[in-house]
Image (cartoon, rainbow, N blue to C red):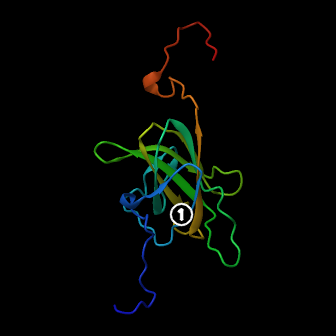
Amino acid sequence: ATTDDGSCQEPPANDQQANAEAVACDAYVSGSLLNATDDSNLIGTDFGNNAVTSAGVWYVYNAAAEEQVTFSTCDTPANDLETDYTSDTKLFVYSQAIDGSLVAIASNDDGCETGWLSSATINTSTGTLYYVLVSEYSPTTSGNDFVLSVTCVTGCAVPSNDDCAGAIAQVDGVPFYG
């Protein structure tokens, strides 16, 4: 076609994981789910009782330190006559294995104080890339636009027994406090 008749529907630039938009601490970025696709074939997969139920867009966070990072769509405004904000998001946070496969770390659906927007908090490791998928509750959710915020808290000591590999053995019959 030599004339744009409006029938061409381009997905967002960060529609594919390979084109994830970089985000950093204290970021507020506007995003759109309009014409998003499921390039990673994640629809139908779930983590933490949250299934990926619609296509989404990708963001990547490169951890500069060991810190606690929150990814949130809670700051997405309500609609007025001229906006098309979504009212129901889901967030999924992944790292990437050596073979390139995604490793689910966190997910959230409806984690904000008001409405059905989402928020996920993770503890990061220096130099690790974290991929954030923002999607909607379903393909029929109204609205397309959202605001993703990234907040970081440094100096949060992660307990040595934060995962199974660091579990502290307990002695039977001896109370443990702490």
Q: Residue at x 40, y 56 (%)?
A: 42
- The kind of residue on which mark 1 rests is Ser
Say above or below: 162 vs 35.
Answer: above
Mark 1 Cα shell of 10 Å, populated few (<14), some (14-19), many (≥20): some
Q: Residue at x 48, y 48 (%)?
A: 93
Say above or below: 94 vs 77.
Answer: above
**x, y percent for residue 178:** 63, 17
Q: Residue at x 58, y 32 (%)?
A: 155
Find disc 1 in the rendering and name its residue.
138
Q: Is residue 120 left or right of residue 52?
A: right
Q: Residue at x 53, y 40 (%)?
A: 122
Q: Nearer the viewer, residue 157 or 139?
A: 157
Q: Nearer the viewer, residue 78 or 153?
A: 153
Asked which secondary structure carries label 1, the reply is loop
Q: Image quarter for residue 39?
A: bottom left
Say above or below: 26 vs 146.
Answer: above
Q: Is residue 11 left or right of residue 170?
A: left
**x, y percent for residue 65:** 49, 38
Q: Quarter of the image containing the N terminus?
A: bottom left
